[in-house]
Amino acid sequence: MTQRRRPTIHEVAKVAGVSISSVSRALNGNTSNADMVARVNAAVQQVGYVPSVVAQSLKTRHTGQVAFAMEDIGNAAYLEMVRRIQPTLRDVGYRLLLHSTGADVEDELSVLASLSQNYVDGLILCPLRVTDRHVEALRRAAVPVVVIGLLPDDVPVDNVRADSRVGARLAVEHLAESGARRIAFIDGPLDTVPGRARYDGFRAGLATTGLRTDDSLVRFTDFQFEAGRRTALALLGEHPDVDAVLGANDLIAMGVLHALRELGRDVPGDVRVVGMDDTPLAATSFPALSSVSLGSADRGRIAAELLLRRLDGDDAPPERVTVPPSLTVRESSR
Amino acid sequence: MTQRRRPTIHEVAKVAGVSISSVSRALNGNTSNADMVARVNAAVQQVGYVPSVVAQSLKTRHTGQVAFAMEDIGNAAYLEMVRRIQPTLRDVGYRLLLHSTGADVEDELSVLASLSQNYVDGLILCPLRVTDRHVEALRRAAVPVVVIGLLPDDVPVDNVRADSRVGARLAVEHLAESGARRIAFIDGPLDTVPGRARYDGFRAGLATTGLRTDDSLVRFTDFQFEAGRRTALALLGEHPDVDAVLGANDLIAMGVLHALRELGRDVPGDVRVVGMDDTPLAATSFPALSSVSLGSADRGRIAAELLLRRLDGDDAPPERVTVPPSLTVRESSR
DNA sequence: AACCGACTCGGAAACGTTTCCAGAACGACG
DNA sequence: CGTCGTTCTGGAAACGTTTCCGAGTCGGTT
């Protein structure tokens, strides 16, 4: 490997026979003399010059980079977000940095703190939960931040949220309309933001449809397939009269489908099932799973757009966008 | 927002009453005088100093960043890779940049070219296919590159590959051992690297098990769920005697499962099904899908480790690692 | 007591850009 | 023909670090 030093703007200037300031101007379109531009371009070609983004960043004080931080990219919801955030940013020339915090609150905070190092121009953050220290860190963040998820009203930061409360209510109303009377709910942990919101939405749905609230039909477990399966087996054993189950996410709902199959109950004939998040799992399961989409892709796109506005210098007051949920009915509840 | 300028090493030096060189040395552990270190640290605390990584990068000529480029992060195989690459790099202080090239060869090449801008210290690349221009670009890449996927032998670049040929053979041998005699294969496009390798592996498996090769039982379609389902419906209509189907990935195999269900054929009683890639889909489908893992997570981890070695200055000849496939047998072929 | 080596510290020069500023060139106008 | 305004160019100063180099201090050896 020939360890030749890569050419700088000085080489170009020498070859073109002009000053480095003229080279810079020609390359950045700040010159009108066509002859100068042509000479510089020729010299650039000749020496194979490529600007150093690091030096540019140092001088211009922006990096052309944006970070996205979330718990685990393996989570389908975050994955959908990345898939929309990346092209949105890329189209206007930003690079995307990924931070998987791995469910570690300290790690989340250290990402926020590290923003002072100025290695990115902005951040999109999906916090697991929002502590006082988060609020403090968000207040003094060195660059614009957009938070995807619930956020106290007084935190001066752009915010995009899903409405999983309404989402859960939608699911319950749909199940009730299609004839279900004994609707069970398998939720995630109640001390997480989505777990809580979905529980509230479930009860709200029961209330609006006039169904009786029976907390013995509600279980809290992890947002995982096996957890959903085992919990469903137990629940259905104790309450054979259940005629519909709402899973707090698609993985749980898939577990429920498995459990029902093991118990020999027909879906949707005996029991209807609905999941949440509307991941690719839902469309390919058998029977195909009805699911409430919480608009992950949209949330990602909107967050990216909000951030881009800030990076453009917009200093309007922070915005709060709520993406409405939508239910896709498939065979599991038809 | 108080637009106060963030403090530099000069502020720290002034407050501590020492020179900027001493501050730099103290912060980088190049000084032994405990008193100096203490004073500098105190000053750092007092003014709230955080080093500028951009300035550091300019001076030290490395950025602490690594890029990972692939077609689409939505693909489960790439997703698994990212999930292992990120922590591996993070543990030694590197940040990860994501490039989804979106099946665009030009975009892939432009990523390679952009390496000359020196915004990353290294790259992990999963090329769709390897053209002459790729080879040329890889040869003159400005920073170390590790390629995940097939690569001509003479390209001087670290390389990690799966062995989907052996993977497909494994699947066929397993199906034959469990009693299948008429094994069909639904492959992806034959002009893609994995499509070709899996086809070869399928035929090799038939050969080693002594089963007759019948190309009317092989179909080429897209690596997608719907494609798999429709192709399976057609295939099984024409050949009702098929007693096993290998899908070239899990999505195709899921489509096959659906098709069999629509046709009222029992799995695995009437027809056994095996997929490839061993994605999360496989474990949650019903019946749970047997699948050949091509070691995406391992490939990601190994690629990251190889790259780290290069970044550490290792200039040994390029390495070539092949990750062996492994079959996980689940209900769909038991 | 003088000298020598080891060690520490400050000054200054990089790293590769952008941009401010001042001067040169030049046409136009009085 | 002199002056003024405009346009273009080159020099030089940043941006915020790291690191080289030389000067100074100090303890130990002859």
Image (cartoon, coloured by chain):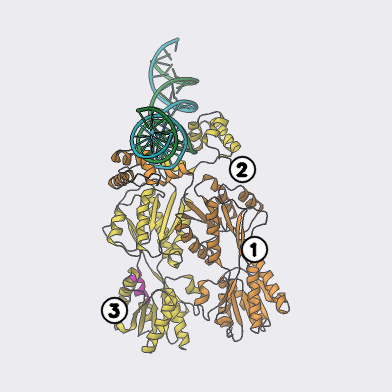
Chain colours: A yellow, B orange, C green, D cyan
In the image, A16: left or right of A157?
A: right
Q: Give the distance between the C-alpha atoms of the residues marked 2 and 1, in whole angstroms.
A: 32 Å
Q: Which residues are magenta?
A: A163-171
Q: Give the residue displayed 59% in from the left and 35% down from the top.
A: A42
Helix, strand or loop at mark 3? helix
Q: Chain of mark 2?
A: A
* Residue B78 screen position, x and y as percent: 53, 63
Instruction: Return the residue at label 3.
Output: A207
Please tell me whether mark 3 or mark 2 is closer to you in this view.
2
Task: Name the one closer to the observer, A284 or B305.
Answer: B305
Q: Are marks 2 and 1 on the same chain?
A: no
Q: Chain of mark 3?
A: A
- Residue type at the position of mark 3: Ala
The stretch drawn in magenta includes residue A35:
no
Q: Quadrant of residue A181?
A: bottom left
Could you tell me which quadrant the N terminus of chain A lies in?
Answer: top right
Q: Give the distance between the C-alpha atoms of the residues marked 3 and 1, in whole angstroms.
A: 56 Å
- Residue type at the position of mark 2: Thr
> Is residue A329 placed above or below A70 in the rendered structure?
below
* Label 2 crowd bin: few (<14), some (14–19), many (20+), radius 10 Å: few
Helix, strand or loop at mark 2? loop
* Residue B303 screen position, x and y as percent: 55, 59
Instruction: Return the residue at label 2.
Output: A2
- Residue type at the position of mark 1: Val
Instruction: Return the residue at label 1.
Output: B193
Q: Are marks 3 and 1 on the same chain?
A: no
* Label 3 crowd bin: few (<14), some (14–19), many (20+), radius 10 Å: some
* Residue A32 screen position, x and y as percent: 50, 32
